[in-house]
Amino acid sequence: MRWLLIFFVILLLASGLPGWMRKIGLGRLPGDLRLRIFGREVQVPLASALVLSLLTTWAIHWS
């Protein structure tokens, strides 16, 4: 039951993440892919994910 709750919280956060990322400029870095497949737009923020991962690692390491 606990894992189900954690899964839904992560899903809720992930659904709001793209809008928040656009506000601060992430999601438009070189290396972020935007594909149009069958009339749907799919975003793959590779560079933005790398930047967020490095910032998180740095914050955890220095805290």
Image: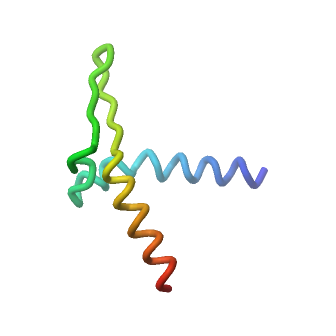
Vertical placement of residue 53 versus 45, above or below = below
Vertical placement of residue 20 versus 30, above or below = below
Quarter of the view holding residue 26: bottom left
Q: Residue furthest right?
A: 1
At a point 63% along the width and 48% down the height, the residue shown is 7
Looking at the image, residue 11 sits to the left or right of residue 51; the answer is right
Q: Position of residue 47 (x, y in %)?
A: 31, 51
Looking at the image, residue 46 sits to the left or right of residue 61; the answer is left
At a point 33% along the width and 45% down the height, the residue shown is 45
Q: Position of residue 43 (x, y in %)?
A: 32, 36
Foreground: 5 or 42?
42
Q: Position of residue 57 (x, y in %)?
A: 47, 70
Foreground: 62 or 10?
62
Q: Residue furthest top?
A: 38
What's the image's color scheme? rainbow
At a point 28% along the width and 43% down the height, the residue shown is 32
